[in-house]
Image (tube, grey):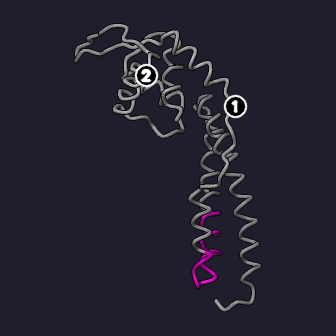
Amino acid sequence: MSAPFVLLGLLGDGPKHGYDLKHAYDRTLPRAKPLGFGQVYATLGRLERDGFVAQAGQERAGGPDRTTFAITDAGRVELERWVGEVESPAPHVGAVLLAKVMVALMWPDSGRAVRYLAAQRAAHTARLRELTAVKTDPDAGVGDVIAADYAIAHLDADLVWLRTTLARVAELHRGEPQ
């Protein structure tokens, strides 16, 4: 999970409290699943336990006390190690999309997989259009565009696979009673 390292990176430019870190995380990764406040504080607790962050003070801005955290030297070293580490390609295919196609192929209804693949291709195409609109939105920030590019590349790869698999499955079932 990258959330602890993103939080360490966000602390790189100075101390922050959990509330600010949560919002900065969501701004930094605008198309990712938002990080919950509970997850922020639990992660900060683990980072503090491991010596990667330290409490830097308390603030009170018209509400409850807010603990401010700062990255430690050990945290900077760990962050540098993580950023420099090349991600290994996944050794196994574990996508839900693949699992659904494989299960659909097991059913006696030979057209089920073809119908599913066609419907999934339509859903992917619709999402591709939405993301393309993000890239042309004049109010989109660079983070939005980079995240859209990333998602589009994955959707493109899925669409190639869907098209190939649909043709393969349709060919297998030609001539079978529907």
Relative image position of residue 76 (x, y in whole percent): 55, 14
For disc 2, the marked residue is: 47
Identify the residue shown where x is 64% and y is 55%.
Answer: 93
Compared to residue 135, the image places residue 10 above or below, namely: above
Viewer-nearest residue: 22 or 76:
76
For disc 1, the marked residue is: 86
- Range covered by the magenta-colored residues: 105-121
Viewer-nearest residue: 136 or 100:
100
Identify the residue shown where x is 23% and y is 14%.
Answer: 62
Compared to residue 106, the image places residue 46 above or below, namely: above
Q: Main secondary structure of the magenta part?
A: helix
Mark 1 to mark 2 CA distance (whole Å): 22 Å
74 left or right, relative to 38: right
Q: In the picture, residue 84 is in which quadrant?
A: top right
Identify the residue shown where x is 37% and y is 8%.
Answer: 56
Q: Earlier in the sequence, mark 1 or mark 2?
A: 2
11 left or right, relative to 176: left
Q: Secondary structure at mark 1?
A: loop
